[in-house]
Image (tube, grey):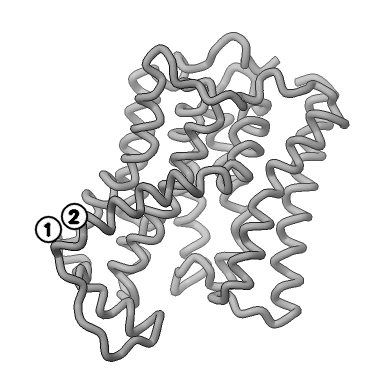
């Protein structure tokens, strides 16, 4: 690794961590409730720190420019399939999580959303959600995931289109693992604040980092195969909206939430199987194009 690249990576990490952690720390000192809309705004703002850091490094510190940043929306040559996969993967994974939880009696999802409404919104007197409305709800979640993709670009442009491309030249698996650990550690303040929903933050931290390692392999593959940062940004948005939100409302208040959450035990195993298939089939290494070779 060249000295300028090493300098760029260090600068990127310092800006990304300092900027986001400062935002979260100041919000706590100001007494902002973690479940408030104001704190949601803080998390959205801090979510752009990876992109801001990557732009600063690319344009002013290493001056390498944006030639391999993957900013174009690449859909030709069948690459649209990666976007479709990115959008539907969390929905498929949630279906498997629900199936496993029911099959093994781990937890019972509340499709009426009664428990979620009572627990989170304090809506005591409300009727159950009719099952017939679930297709409409899922369609709305899919559309919303597409709409919020530019917001998740704020993270992905930094993690996938800078850090993961620059770490460990020619070794995409190792780069994905290291990026996954760093990405997971970046979220640690949110986990200990209770934002991610883990009852035990120490256990939650370990599970979350395992999850981000698996997602880094999958998102990195999407980024390289599509040639665009927008594929992994869509996958990140769908993961948060469809995976994260859906598991939170279906299993709200369940004592085994850490098992059935999208960043829980079952999901980590399932995502790990997908990541393992990408590795063992050679697809991850084969997805490394020459122009983004990590020189």
Residue at 73% across, 36% down? 54
Query: What SS does tag 1 mark?
Result: helix
Where 161 sits versus 74, above or below?
Answer: below
In the image: residue 15, left or right of residue 206: right
In the image: residue 137, left or right of residue 61: left
Q: Rounded to the nearest whole Å, what is the CA distance between mark 1 and mark 2?
A: 5 Å
Residue at 58% across, 39% down? 156
Residue at 48% across, 35% down? 219
Residue at 44% across, 40% down? 235
Give the image quarter of residue 123: bottom left
Q: Are marks 1 and 2 in contact (CB under 8 Å)?
A: yes
In the image: residue 227, left or right of residue 51: left
Q: Nearer the viewer, residue 147 or 290?
A: 147
Q: Which residue is mark 2?
A: 100
Q: Which residue is mark 1?
A: 103
Query: What SS does tag 2 mark?
Result: helix
In the image: residue 129, left or right of residue 26: left
Within 10 Å of disc 1 (Cα), the crowding (few <14, some 14-19, many 20+) is few
Where 152 sits versus 275, above or below?
Answer: below
Measured as percent of width and height from the top left, residue 279 is found at: 40, 25
């Amino acid at each position: 690794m060249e000295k300028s690249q090493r300098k760029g990576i260090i600068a990127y990490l310092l800006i990304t961590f300092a900027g986001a952690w400062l935002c979260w720390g100041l919000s706590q000192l100001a007494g902002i409730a973690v479940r408030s809309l104001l704190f949601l705004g803080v998390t959205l703002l801090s979510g752009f720190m990876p992109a801001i850091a990557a732009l600063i490094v690319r344009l002013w510190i290493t001056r390498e420019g944006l030639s391999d940043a993957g900013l174009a929306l690449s859909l030709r040559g069948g690459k649209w399939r990666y976007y479709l996969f990115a959008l539907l993967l969390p929905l498929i994974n949630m279906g498997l999580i629900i199936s496993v939880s029911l099959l093994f009696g781990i937890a019972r999802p509340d499709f009426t959303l009664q428990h979620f409404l009572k627990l989170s919104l304090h809506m005591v007197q409300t009727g159950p959600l009719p099952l017939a409305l679930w297709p409409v709800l899922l369609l709305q979640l899919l559309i919303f995931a597409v709409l919020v993709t530019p917001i998740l670009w704020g993270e992905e442009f930094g993690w996938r289109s800078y850090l993961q491309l620059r770490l460990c030249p020619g070794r995409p698996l190792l780069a994905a693992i290291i990026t996954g650990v760093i990405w997971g550690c970046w979220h640690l303040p949110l986990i200990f604040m209770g934002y991610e929903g883990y009852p035990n933050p120490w256990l939650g931290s370990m599970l979350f980092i395992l999850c981000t390692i698996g997602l880094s392999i999958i998102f990195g593959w999407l980024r390289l195969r599509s040639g665009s940062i927008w594929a992994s940004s869509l996958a990140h948005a769908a993961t948060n909206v469809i995976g994260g939100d859906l598991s939170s409302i279906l299993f709200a208040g369940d004592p085994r939430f850490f098992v059935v959450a999208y960043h829980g035990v079952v999901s980590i195993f399932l995502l790990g199987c997908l990541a393992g298939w990408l590795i063992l089939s050679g697809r991850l290494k084969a997805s490394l194009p020459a122009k983004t070779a990590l020189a």
